Image (spheres, rainbow, N blue to C red):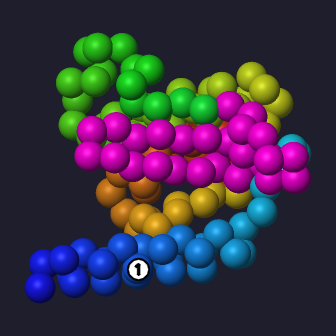
Amino acid sequence: MAVELQKKIRKMRERRARRVRSKIFGTAARPRISVFRSNRAIYVQFIDDEKGHTLLAFSSKKLPDAEQKQNKTAQAMRVGEEAGKLAKEHGIVKAVFDRGSYRYHGRVKALAEGIRKAGIQF
């Protein structure tokens, strides 16, 4: 029973990610912000889908040790702020947010708010 439930959950995540991804496309001028959330860390990438290149990336593993001891939602907010600053340095002011298979809640929402706080428009 547990294996069947895991398969169902994985299938639903894949469907949700496919549905979200079908509506989003990133360009060099307006890249796609892709989010990956693991149990320990959160990762963000700015992707140009026309060329298939990652323009820049940032994760909670790159934060200073003191900030890595914060709770995961606070870390996600800091990652968003730092990624937004990096994007501004690279001349990115607008982007599209790809939440993937994750719901727009908790750490994913905190990351998006951090990026907005840094001045990137979705």
Would residue 37 appear left or right of 7 to someone viewing this image? Answer: right
Q: Residue at x 78, y 26 (%)?
A: 90
Report which quarter residue 91 is drawn in: top right
The dominant secondary structure in magenta is strand
Q: Secondary structure at mark 1?
A: helix
Q: Amino acid at mark 1?
A: Lys
Q: Is residue 62 above or below residue 104?
A: above
Nearest the eye: 55 or 4: 4
| Most distant residue in the left direction | 1
Residue 93 visible here = no
Residue numbers of the magenta segment: 30-56
The spot of residue 57 in percent (x, y) is 60, 32
Q: Residues within 10 Å of mark 1 (few under 14, many from 20)?
A: few
Q: Is residue 68 above or below residue 114?
A: above
Q: Residue at x 13, y 78 (%)?
A: 2
Would residue 67 appear left or right of 44 to someone viewing this image? Answer: left
Q: Is residue 69 above or below residue 106?
A: above
| Residue 20 lies in the magenta stretch | no
Give the quadrant of the C terminus: bottom right
Report which quarter residue 74 is drawn in: top left
Nearest the eye: 99 or 116: 99
Give the quadrant of the N terminus: bottom left
Q: Residue at x 33, y 57 (%)?
A: 106
Q: Which residue is mark 1?
A: 11
The spot of residue 95 in percent (x, y) is 73, 51
The spot of residue 14 in percent (x, y) is 48, 74
Would residue 89 appear left or right of 12 to someone viewing this image? Answer: right
The spot of residue 105 in percent (x, y) is 37, 63
Residue 18 visible here = yes
Q: Residue at x 53, y 61 (%)?
A: 99
Count of marks overlaid on the render? 1
